[in-house]
Amino acid sequence: MNGNIPVGNIFGIPFYVNPSWFLVLGLVTLDYGSALAAQFPAMGGPLPWLWGLVAALLLFASVLAHELGHSFVAIGQGIEVRSITLFLFGGLASLERESKTPGEAFWVAIAGPAVSIILFVLLTAINLTAPFTGPVAAIFGLLAYINLVLALFNLIPGLPLDGGNILKALVWKITGNPYKGVVFASRVGQILGWVGIIIGSLSLLGISNYGSFWTMLIGWFLLQNAGRSAQSAAIADTLAGLKAEDAVTPNSPIVAANLSLREFANDFVIGNEKWRKFLVIDEWGQLIGSIKVEDMKTIPTSNWPQTQVKQLTQAIAGSTTVRADQSLLEVVQLLEQLQLSQLPVVRDNGVLVGLLEKAHISSLLQQKAQAKPA
């Protein structure tokens, strides 16, 4: 998974850490360990940094709880959570699909910050009422503060932050188009990303007292991810407006079932290296299966004139065909789900329209993009 390291399962959800997580773990351990050593000089040896490691691990436990908040609400909506990954800038819950309504999308987005706020209140109450002193009290105070910052930071209204997903849900509710919500929230995320980069850069150059290297890095993170979200949403919006029949490959590999193997070889196979598998139709144009060129080897060439294509035809499961009027976005999702590169397209009466290929979908998207006014 992109270099991520599997750790195990949490409530049945695969849990990973990105190698960048170890960098932050080390930095937090050293930074907070040094702060504890200065705050409690009586602690000697490596003890302050051991407490720093405890604080760092509890910090990431808070991030994990934040992501579990998103995950549990998504699971309640029937959405599979593929994984949770901790990385340089926090955590990410990878969902199987988007919510079906803007209301559901809102609750998935708000769940993470809500968990962080609850943890802030709980940890603050414990720190105020429990008789903790020394580094334990300091760590409880730190965790309370971190959870508050985590909630407020994630509520910034730009993708890929939770606030961006909340904004996406609101725009989706107003416009009725989920992709417009993503594009709008992504644009806001890109603006905020540039703001972070500029503020961080001015700080590094000594021009401003605000910001830091981390401000610039977070701005870059927002800019990159928001840009990808906008691009993906634009593609999904285009696909949703097209049908499967719009992406059928011209001159699809189609042969008649009553054709002899000799005619099939002469007219379709010899001199044609592109297609090694053909869709087979009956006399009414209905799809009955497919034939592989290599299967012709099972029949002696002397028998080819008397053997019809239908005798070597293999049935095609209905689950691996798509309707001509089906949304092209649904078709792309099906291709990914089944891990296929092509699917036959048929009408409601079973008549074959042609073959749909991933490569042709890409070409179609390029044509649509070029056709748009600048």
Image (cartoon, rainbow, N blue to C red):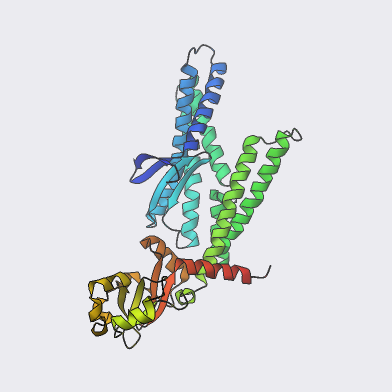
Residue 14, picture quadrant = top left
Residue 257: horizontal and vertical position, in percent? 30, 83
In-image side of 374 versus 225 (left or right) = right
Compared with 162, 297 (above or below) is below
Residue 171 shows in the view = no
Residue 98: horizontal and vertical position, in percent? 46, 58
Q: Depth check: give the residue in front, 53 or 66.
A: 53
Residue at horizontal 47 percent and vertical 63 percent from the top? 101
Compared with 24, 104 (above or below) is below
In-image side of 372 versus 301 (left or right) = right
Residue at horizontal 63 percent and vertical 53 percent from the top? 188
Quadrant into which the C terminus falls: bottom right
Residue 97: horizontal and vertical position, in percent? 43, 58
Residue at horizontal 59 percent and vertical 60 percent from the top? 183
- Furthest-bottom residue in view? 283
Compared with 81, 348 (above or below) is below
In-image side of 259 versus 21 (left or right) = left
Residue 64 shows in the view = yes
